[in-house]
Amino acid sequence: MSQYIDVHCHLPENYFYNSIDTYIKRWNQIGLKYIVSVSQNYRESLRTIELSQKYPKIIIPAIGIHPWKAHKKIEELSLIKGLLSQHKQIRILGEIGLDKHFIKQRERYPLQQKVLDFFFEQAEKQDYRLMLHVKGAEQEIIDRIETSSIPGSHCCIHWFSGTEEILQQLIDLDCYFSCGPALKYSTKHQQVPKKAPIARLLTESDGNVKYQGIVGHPGLMRDVIKLMADLTKISNKKIQQTVLNNFYQFLNT
Ligand SMILES: [Zn+2]
């Protein structure tokens, strides 16, 4: 049976969390091998750890503070630091990043930056992988990667929808890219599988975000693979196997 991965899903959201046993059963049946549970604050990070301990074979924990929440949750950084030292099995930090598109309040940008700097510092010390939200702040993220000792190959750019030039810079930095159901309609997102090396592609749902009215969830990864196959002109099977291998590479190199 084909195996799928979802490298960015908001499992701590009540939508999934409250019915997780039912969902895991269903996702197991349709070939989900791994789901990365991303967290947006301390409370969600605790939930992510709990879920990954309950389902260690399928749920991979990522803990973080989302850029949309940075201005409210910056004081939670010390708690997050405690979690990281307590739970050495955590390999991924996310969802973290910057957002200057949806967040219009400029006074929040320095706080977003401070929170992001904290996570970069942790990754410089401990070799974490980064699950990055970059909307409207793509150049700032590139600058941050370039001025750090973290290789681009330790960074996964989530749901890229920026310009062609910026995409090329991220490709040159050797970043990974997670693509989702928006491949169906977003020409900006479609650039990613068309231009990035196949060895740098990953799949994500960003569940439970809605895509043109349809709720995103890991069960859609088969459709995402099909969309990628159409855009790259590579077979479904090859894309699916490559994406799985890419994920092992992302975690282990
Ligand atoms: Zn997300």
Image (cartoon, rainbow, N blue to C red):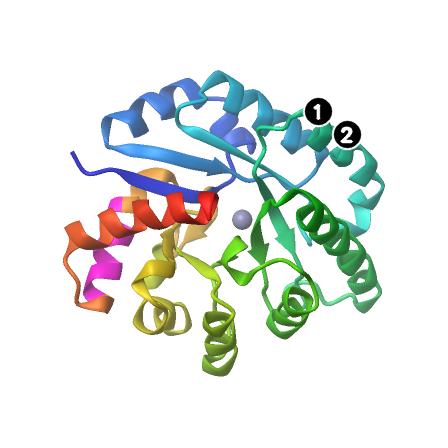
On the question of residue 41 being in view, the answer is: yes
10 Å crowding of disc 2: few (<14), some (14-19), many (20+): few
Q: How many marks?
A: 2
Q: Magenta segment, which residues?
A: 222-230
User: Tags 1 and 2 in contact by the CB under 8 Å rule?
Assistant: yes
- Amino acid type of the residue that numbered disc 1 sits on in the rendered structure: Gln
Question: Which residue sits at x=39%, y=52%?
Answer: 213
Helix, strand or loop for the magenta stretch, by majority: helix
10 Å crowding of disc 1: few (<14), some (14-19), many (20+): few
Q: Which residue is mark 2?
A: 82
Q: Quadrant of residue 57?
A: top left
* Residue sitting nearer the eye, 124 or 230: 124
Q: Is residue 106 magenta?
A: no
Q: The residue tagged with tag 1: helix, strand or loop?
A: helix
Q: Which residue is mark 1?
A: 86
Indicate the position of residue 192 as horizontal and vertical percent values.
38, 68
Q: Is residue 46 above or below residue 250?
A: above
Indicate yes or no: mark 1 CB to ligand 1 under 8 Å.
Answer: no
